Structure formats: structure tokens, C-alpha cells
Amino acid sequence: MQATTAPRAHVAIALLSALLFIGCQGSDARAKKTPDPGVGEISLNPELVRSGQVQVEAVATRPEAVAVRTSGKVDFNEEHLSYVSSPLAGQVVDLRSRPGDHVTAGQTLAVIDSPDLGAASSEFIKARADLVLAERNHTLAEELVRAKAMAAKDYQKAEDEYVKAKADLRRTRERLVSLGMPADALDGPLDSLHVRSQFNLTTPISGTVVERTLTLGQMVGGDNAPRLFVVADLDTLWVKADIYEKDLSLIHPGQEVSVRANAWPDEVFSGRIDYVGDTVDPNSRTVKVRATVDNHQQRLKPEMFVTATVQTDASATLLSVPLAAVHGEGSAQAYVFTVLDGDRVARRAVTLGVKVDDRVVVTAGLSPQDRVVTSGSILLKAEVDHPNS
């Protein structure tokens, strides 16, 4: 009996070991077919997708022009700016304009009484009289030469004096015109001319008087004369900005620029780049760029700080997802649910850009090949956050 029982016991043990081995193999096979979700991952129930409770959408892509945004400052357009000073020393006897006045080219800004102008006026009148006498003597000399009643050297002397008198008159006349004396006032009859010591200080350009540094009775002019008026055409202004060295290849003259100022948050001022600097600032690693901006309504003011956006010729692929796909917006980290291989879903941190209608641009965290859960993604949030609850 004992001999018979022992072989049966060995057979039973062998059968039990075989069953356990087979069971382990089956368990391993099932584990390979349905792996446990990793950290932050869950398995997406296909029934939720079929029923429409959960919707999946591919990340949208579209080409977008690359814009370079920087800060800048408004300045006068120096091609339409004039610093007006007095060419002669004298005393201010009349003020004809004040800051804020709009003036046209040639308009009088102030009247100045100058002894130097009186001397120049007197010299011109004398040159006119000398020319009359020299011309009369030259005409008489020509008649005497033809009659052989004058020596050649005497005729030559009369001709030289006549040429010199014409040159003196031209010089003194141009001097008075340069001082603002009207040309037609110098061409009247000789007996109507009189010495004038007052001259009109005029503006060479049309624009707005933005600065006046003189008062009635003040002495002005002389050596190194300071500016008395600043006249600027404010219909166009310059915006000077700094472009980082890494963006320099995207910037060139002729590109359009959009300018915004804090004073007018809802208004965009249009301009165009007309200068790109030739040197890089060694400290900031930036290059100076200048744009001429339209300012016909004169809302922009010199010294204003502005934001300038340059529309470049380059383009980049822009990614966007529906707003319904985004969670944690406004918190430290926004995220979406991306669909992985098979039916697995994982939470993915993203960086958001601008919103356009019901979509938002994603600047980091996704690729064009990704798919995200849109409608119904709230059903997955609790399960991903607390997978064991």
C-alpha cells in the first residue's frame, strides 16, 4: 500500500505544478495585452468616444508670418525739423508766434533790431549809388574812346570801376536777402531806399512751433547763437527701437511697422522702416532701427514710449487647439489631454499664446502630430489626477 500511494502523490504534485505554470503564463499574457496606465495616464474607454461624450481632435496647424515686437521711443522727424536762430546780434522788438502755433514756410516768428543790419543796409544803398556813378562814367568813356578823345588806360580804369561797382552791389544785395530782407524791396528807385535796422526772423519750413526760448527785449545773436525757435512738422515722426542681434536677419528697410502707445490703447499707427543701424551695442546686443510713422492726427508725441511690431517676411507653423481642450488656464501651468498609442490618454503641460475666437495658440508642449481630447475632457481630469480613487 505504501508503495502504491507514493507514486500517486508524485503524480498529483506534478499536475498541480503544471496547472500553476499554465496559470502564470496566462496571467503574463493578459498583462502584456492591457498594460497598467503609467503615471498621469489612463485608458480611454472607446465607448465614450463612440457615444460622443468624449471627442478627439488633431492639433490644427497653419503658416503664420513671423512678427518681431520691441519697445521704442517717439522722436522728431529730423528731416522735417528746424532750429531757428538769429544770424545777427540784436534786440527782440516784436514776437509774432508762440509754442503750439502752426506756421508756414517764410512766416515771421519775431522781429529783431540789429545795428549790423543797419550797417549792411547802408552799405547796399551806397553800392547802388556807386553803381549809378560808375555806369555813367563807363558810358561817357565809351563815347570818348569812339571819338578818340580818351586814352586807352583811362577807359580801362572806368571799365574796371564799373565792373567793381556791379560786384559790390551784388554782394551787398545778397547779404541783405540772406538776412531776410525781401528782394523786391531792394529793387525800387534809389531815392526810395532808406537804411533799415530791423529784420524779420522767419521759419524755413511749415510746421508747429514746439519751443521758443526768447522774450521781448532780449538781446540775441552773436557768435555761437543759440536756437530761438524749434519748428517741427509733426505729421510724421520717427520711432527709434532696439532689435536684438538674433532677430536682425529678419529686419530690413521698407518693412511695415505697427506702433501702439499706452495713451491710445485702441489705436494702431502705421509706419515703415527706413534705417537699420550698422553697429551692435556691446552691452545690450541690440541694433538701432528707425521707422517713419504717420501722425497726421498728431496723437503721438516726441519722447513717448511705444511698442513697435515689425511684420517680417519669414513664416512659422502655428499650432492651435480648441479652448475646450485646455485645463488650468490662468494657473501656474495649463495642460491638455493627448491621445497616445492605442487608447491611452496622458496629461501634457502646454504654453499658451493668443486666443482667436474659440481657439488658443499653443507655443510649446505640442507637435503637429499630436491629438488632443476636446469635448468631454473634464470626464478624464479626475481620473488622471486621482487614478487610485
Image: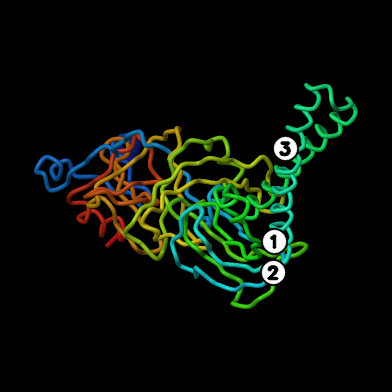
| Secondary structure type for disc 1 | helix
| Secondary structure type for disc 2 | strand
Residue drawn at the location 58% of the way across and 55% of the way down: 82
Residue 166 place in picture, x, y as percent: 73, 39
Q: Quadrant of residue 16?
A: top left
- The kind of residue on which mark 1 rests is Leu
**What is the C-alpha distance between the residues marked 2 and 3?**
36 Å
Q: Depth check: 88 or 60 in front?
A: 88
Question: Mark 1 sits on what residue?
Answer: 117
Question: Mark 2 sits on what residue?
Answer: 90
Residue 135 marker: 3
Assess whether mark 2 and mark 1 are in contact (beta carbons under 8 angstroms). yes
Residue 5 appears anywhere in the view: no
Residue 104 place in picture, x, y as percent: 46, 55
**What is the C-alpha distance between the residues marked 1 and 3?**
27 Å
Locate residue 297 relative to residue 154 in the image: left or right: left
Assess whether mark 3 and mark 1 are in contact (beta carbons under 8 angstroms). no
Q: Depth check: 170 or 108 in front?
A: 170
